[in-house]
């Protein structure tokens, strides 16, 4: 209807309408676009030709091997590092050296930095002038919820308490994009549950986008919409968690007559462990696809169950050549 109204309009009228529509158009495409970024440190390639789109209002979990590039990727997404090649855009704008875009982002690194004299109160005083969306009511509420003295020096606190302080400050800036590196490390179970609730509430109420790098796969499984698996700086997979779980099954089967290796390739077995006639298989696909083929062999016993995210991680990393046997 708008395009029909524009047809035949005078130039000034058309320009006025487009100007009015611009904020809504930008809002509609609000997302993080990662286009073929590469980052090297000397001879080490930390992130290698990495491409990914992160939709608004989503929670993305980044998992991978130690030294796989997760923290470097977050620093590029937050504009701390500039990629050697490729680009990162937020709302269609490059984030590196762009204060207006950075004002909508907040990054909590694995080891949050605070000066020797920093407290929640004096750091909040600084952030009020740096972040345009600072919410004083939210800050006061979080200070009352988390067991932290606002006037205590943060540097004297435990690792878990320092992370809580960083999160209080981060959420109080009302970021559009919240980037977290190992945020659950050092938190006790009660605080972990509180943190997850706060994140979920902000995603739901404020359409906030959250990206979390973590080795705690159980926490990510409960919190994230999508998972991104990274190894040696490369993207191995990026899918919705439900889709990943539906696409892999853990199967135990006992055969009267053991099939040859070509049969296991036919049903897309990616991991196999054998004890006599009993096989423990990891199969890529749905039960509708592989069960009829297994049942044709008239097995003595067969059971298929979904895999946990941790089991999927181990399986996918093993398929990429990263497993205990290869490491040892």
Image (spheres, rainbow, N blue to C red):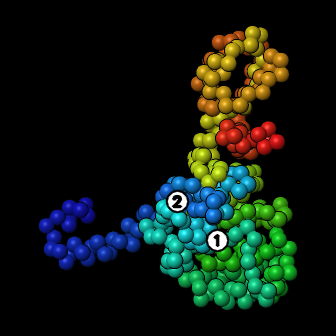
Q: Label 1: which residue?
A: 107
Element under label 1? strand
327 to the left or right of 24 = right
Quadrant that contains the N terminus: bottom left
179 displayed left or right of 154: left
Q: State the residue at coordinates (60%, 62%).
A: 40
Q: Residue at x 58, y 50 (%)?
A: 235
Q: Where is residue 280 in the image (x, y as percent from the top left)?
A: 77, 27
Residue 218's x, y, as percent?
Answer: 75, 51
Numbered disc in front, either 1 or 2: 2
Q: Nearer the viewer, residue 35 or 7?
A: 35
SS of the residue under disc 2:
strand
Q: Is residue 170 visible?
A: yes
At 48% from the left edge and 61% from the top edge, which residue is drawn?
86
Residue 290 position (above or below residue 326): above
Residue under label 2, please give it. 37
115 shown above or below 161 = below
Q: Nearer the viewer, residue 172 or 83?
A: 83
Where the C terminus falls, by quadrant?
top right
Going from N to C along the chain, the mark reached first, 1 or 2, is 2
């Amino acid at each position: 209807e708008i395009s029909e109204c524009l047809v035949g309009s005078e130039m000034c009228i058309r320009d006025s309408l487009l100007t009015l529509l611009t904020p809504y158009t930008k809002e509609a495409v609000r997302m993080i676009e990662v286009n073929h970024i590469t980052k090297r440190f000397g001879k080490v390639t930390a992130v290698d030709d990495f491409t990914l789109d992160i939709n608004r209002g989503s929670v993305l979990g980044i998992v991978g091997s130690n030294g796989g590039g997760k923290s470097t990727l977050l620093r590029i997404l937050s504009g701390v590092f500039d990629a050697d090649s490729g680009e990162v855009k937020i709302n269609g704008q490059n984030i590196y050296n762009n204060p207006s875009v950075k004002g909508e982002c907040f990054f909590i690194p694995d080891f949050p930095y605070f000066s020797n004299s920093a407290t929640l109160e004096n750091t909040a005083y600084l952030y009020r002038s740096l972040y345009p969306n600072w919410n004083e009511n939210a800050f006061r509420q979080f200070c009352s919820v988390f067991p932290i003295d606002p006037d205590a020096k943060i540097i004297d606190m435990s690792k878990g308490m320092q992370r809580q302080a960083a999160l209080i400050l981060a959420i109080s800036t009302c970021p559009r994009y919240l980037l977290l590196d190992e945020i659950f490390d050092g938190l006790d179970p009660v605080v972990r549950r509180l943190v997850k609730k706060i994140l979920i509430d902000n995603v739901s109420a404020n359409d906030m986008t959250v990206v979390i790098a973590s080795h705690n796969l159980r926490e990510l499984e409960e919190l994230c919409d999508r998972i991104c698996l990274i190894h040696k700086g490369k993207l191995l997979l990026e899918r919705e968690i439900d889709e990943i779980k539906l696409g892999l099954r853990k199967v135990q089967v006992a055969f009267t007559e053991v099939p040859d290796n070509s049969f296991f390739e036919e049903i897309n077995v990616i991991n196999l462990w054998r004890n006599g006639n009993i096989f423990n298989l990891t199969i890529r696909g749905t039960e509708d696809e592989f069960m009829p083929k297994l049942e044709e062999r008239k097995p003595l016993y067969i059971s298929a169950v979904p895999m946990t995210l941790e089991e999927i991680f181990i399986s996918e990393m093993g398929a990429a050549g990263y497993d205990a046997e290869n490491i040892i």
